[in-house]
Image (cartoon, rainbow, N blue to C red):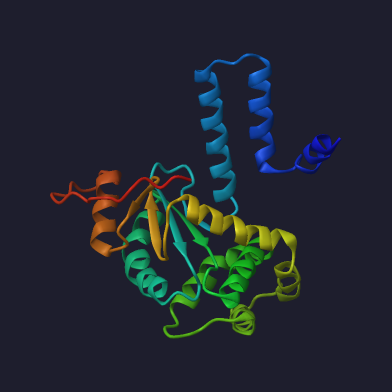
């Protein structure tokens, strides 16, 4: 009875499909090869479902996939956003040759955690403002952001949905989003922010290293200096 109650509670979870598929394979006597293939398909589906929930810019169909792990109160994230993203990555994103996902992990205290929940709710209720919101936060050096400052920034952007966004920040969905971002950070073997993954491989978050990597992947230029990427980032 307890098992069936657990199944019922898990019916809407993204993990339920994976569990059900594995049970079905076992009942059908599936081979190891089929089992492995289904498992990989389910992992890919979970990864795509996760990325569909975080802020995204660029061409979703691009073969170059960049994932940044960051925190809205991280000073290095602000510096590198202005040097690496705005001067290198944005060029490829705006051209449609790359897609960029921003994973705000909210790991630097309660104000950062609130920022993650706020950005989740902003994307839900006023999605066209999310990139401007992040750009303006990172354009303000030395600023520590808290709830009242997030609210004031949004209003200065002529935002019209602050009451709904504020209510949303206290929801289970917003908290689940924060926790999922932090789990993905650990699963990707990211130890600190900022961190950048390009096609599931962690790269040094340095302008020249990122530019060389993007040049090699895009085929626009052939770099004579090969990037030495880090370990595999497992989503």
Task: Answer with left or right where residue 166 lies relative to residue 189.
Answer: right
At x 49%, y 19%, the residue is: 33
Task: Answer with left or right where residue 148 lies relative to residue 107.
Answer: right
Quarter of the image where the N terminus is located = top right
At x 66%, y 33%, the residue is: 19
Query: How far from the left and from the top, in percent, is residue 134?
Result: 51, 70
Q: Is residue 20 above or below residue 94?
A: above
Question: Can you see residue 54?
Answer: no
At x 20%, y 48%, the residue is: 221
Task: Answer with left or right where residue 18 lies relative to residue 102.
Answer: right
Viewer-side residue, 214 vs 12: 12
Residue 142 falls in image quadrant: bottom left
Q: Residue furthest front?
A: 2
Task: Answer with left or right where residue 235 lies relative to residue 205.
Answer: right
Number of labels in the image equals 0
Viewer-side residue, 107 vs 91: 107
Query: How far from the left and from the top, in percent, is residue 227?
Result: 22, 51
Query: How far from the left and from the top, in percent, is residue 51?
Result: 54, 50
Q: Residue furthest left?
A: 224
At x 69%, y 64%, the residue is: 125
Question: Can you see residue 113?
Answer: yes
Query: How far from the left and from the top, in percent, is residue 47?
Result: 54, 44
């Amino acid at each position: 009875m307890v098992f069936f109650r657990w199944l019922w509670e898990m019916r809407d979870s993204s993990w339920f499909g994976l569990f059900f598929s594995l049970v079905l394979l076992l009942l059908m006597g599936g081979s190891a090869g089929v089992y492995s293939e289904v498992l990989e398909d389910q992992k890919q589906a979970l990864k795509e479902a996760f990325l569909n929930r975080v802020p995204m810019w660029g061409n979703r169909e691009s073969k170059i996939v960049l994932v940044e792990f960051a925190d809205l109160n991280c000073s290095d994230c602000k510096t590198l956003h202005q040097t690496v993203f705005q001067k290198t990555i944005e060029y490829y994103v705006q051209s449609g040759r790359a897609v960029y996902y921003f994973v705000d992990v909210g790991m630097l205290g309660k104000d950062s955690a609130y920022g993650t929940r706020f950005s989740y709710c902003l994307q839900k209720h006023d999605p066209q403002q999310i990139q401007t919101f992040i750009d303006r936060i990172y354009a303000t050096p030395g600023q520590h952001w808290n709830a009242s400052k997030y609210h004031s920034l949004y209003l200065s952007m002529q935002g019209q949905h602050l009451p709904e966004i504020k209510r949303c920040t206290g929801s289970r969905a917003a908290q689940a989003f924060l926790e999922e971002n932090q789990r993905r950070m650990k699963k990707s073997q990211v130890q600190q922010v900022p961190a950048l993954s390009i096609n599931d491989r962690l790269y040094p978050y340095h302008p020249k290293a990122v530019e060389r990597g993007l040049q090699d992947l895009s085929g626009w230029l052939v770099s004579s200096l090969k990037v030495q990427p880090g370990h595999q980032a497992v989503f």
